[in-house]
Image (cartoon, rainbow, N blue to C red):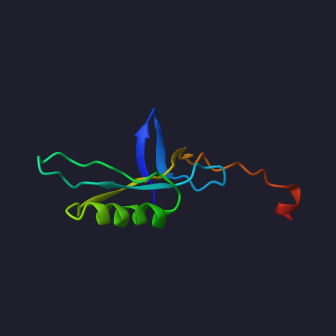
Amino acid sequence: MGLTRRYRHMNWTATPDLEPDAPPTLHLFQCNGENEQGILCGQQSAAGEDFEAARGWSFQHLQTNPDHRSYSHVLSRPWRMLPEIEPGPEPIVPLSDTAHG
């Protein structure tokens, strides 16, 4: 699922950080509605790990601002860069004396 690029004579892969110590994925919803003057509202939910809480904010905001019907889901997901280890030459395995009979 990663994206690979070559940098500093090595291939690197960008991949979501799923390690136990990775920061959490965060969600927030932002209002894209405009007021009567055409100014973007821009209000947003708190950023948090709970998608439903962030989405729930948009319904609450809609109740008090019925013309604000456009929202963006802003997602912050941790990623990590991993170097790809290029295969080295095949190891030379010495033949044992028993291999010759």
Viewer-closest of 2 and 96: 2
Give residue 90's position: percent from left, percent from top.
63, 50
Quadrant including the N terminus: bottom left
Q: Is residue 53 above or below residue 47?
A: below
Viewer-closest of 37 and 72: 37
* Residue at 17% over, 51% down: 35
Residue at the extreme top:
8
Quadrant including the C terminus: bottom right
Give residue 57's position: percent from left, percent from top.
40, 61
* Residue at 41% over, 41% down: 6
Give residue 13's position: percent from left, percent from top.
47, 48
| Side of 69 relative to 5 (left or right) | left
Viewer-closest of 87 and 17: 17
Residue at the extreme left:
37
| Side of 65 relative to 44 (left or right) | left
Q: Specify the quadrant of the image occupied by residue 20.
A: bottom right
Viewer-closest of 92 and 21: 21
Q: Tag count in the figure?
A: 0
| Side of 51 relative to 69 (left or right) | right
Residue at the extreme front:
64
Give residue 75's position: percent from left, percent from top.
41, 54
Q: Is residue 57 above or below residue 87?
A: below
* Residue at 48% over, 44% down: 12
